[in-house]
Image (cartoon, rainbow, N blue to C red):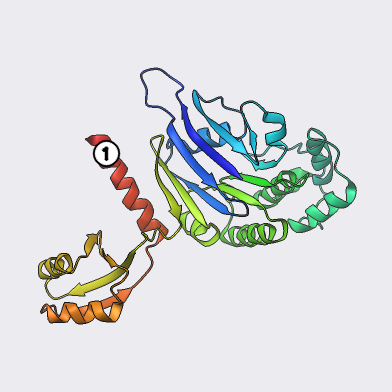
Amino acid sequence: MLSFSGVSKSFDQGRPAALADVSFEVGEGKICGLLGHNGAGKSTALGVLLGMVYPDSGEVIIGGCPVLTDRQNAIRKVGAIFEAPAFYEYLSGWYNLKILTAYSGAVDRKMMEETVEWVGLGSRIKDRVGTYSHGMRQRLALAQALLPRPEVLILDEPTDGLDPEGIVEFREQLLTLREELGLTVLLSSHLLGEVEQVCDEVVILQRGFKVYEGKVRGMEDGWNTFVIESENSETLVKAVQKLGGKKIGDLFQFPSELAAADLLEKLIEEGIRVTKFSEEEESLEALYLKFSQVAGKGDEA
């Protein structure tokens, strides 16, 4: 549904590229998280995707339409919350939607009413936007992004500034909309916990480079991850290596054909006095930190 292919972009000569040969894909109906520190290239990537930033090289395709050569048809498939949404404060939420959707073509009243209900603004849509809370403004921005019906939804820090209840509500809305409309979503956020709960996959950018693309949990194919503690950590590491495993941070990984019960038995046979043993999925936070550290070491080399 959405693909980047070898996209590069530099804004100033002599400075590192904002994007350096970045490629990734988001399949139809998937929610993909776009992660990275400030300056990693997330906003530039979204700008290229929306046709607002022209890349030095590479290609971006949305629903079969190339953005660079057929922007009108490509962007017609997209709804977006990009950067801080701006509204006419003295007008109602309803009239803001009518004005903003007029830029992309007329939207019938029934579709507008249905969308307003979807985002939970039914009781306040006729009030002036100047009276809206931050959370209500985000709902209005989401309604705008959903009109007319897009195939792809681009969200740039959509929960920024929301209170915990607002974040939970937005998460539930997003999952419901994906289910009901079959949306493909690219979500840029710094809230790893939220990304972990709503996204099927993630792309991590570091200093303009893609350093990871894959599952949210980051499980390596063919490997299982364990928490193992013992009375002697040095002896444990040697036994892990002997059994074909490897140490990743505070965790240990072993080939998936080695069942947990068999692994524990083998560790004991090696003389390891195990005090803690559990199999677990790697968290998104651990995944993010691991690839951030890998990128940092590569930059220093």
- The amino acid pointed to by label 1 is Gly
The residue where tag 1 is placed is 298
Q: Quadrant of the C terminus?
A: top left
Residue located 59% across and 53% down the image: 162
Q: What residue is shown at x 44% (from left), y 53% (from top)?
A: 214
Q: Tag 1: Cα neighbours inside 10 Å, few (<14), some, or many (≥20)?
A: few
Seen as rendered, the residue at the extreme front is 257
* Percent x, y of residue 158: 60, 48
* Left or right: 230 as drawn, with respect to 107: left
Q: Is residue 208 left or right of residue 31?
A: left
Relative to 23, is 272 above or below? Answer: below
Residue 17 sits in which quadrant?
top left
- Compared across the picture, whether 200 is left or right of 16 comes to right
Residue at position x 21%, y 82% from top?
265
Numbered disc 1: secondary structure? helix
Q: Quadrant of the N terminus?
A: top right
**Closer to the camera in the image, 160 or 46:** 46
Q: Position of residue 118 (x, y in %)?
A: 76, 58
Where is residue 179 drawn, in percent x and y? 67, 61
| Total numbered badges shown on the rendered structure | 1
Place of residue 207 in the rendered image (x, y in percent of width and height, measured from the top left): 38, 35
Residue 1 seen: yes
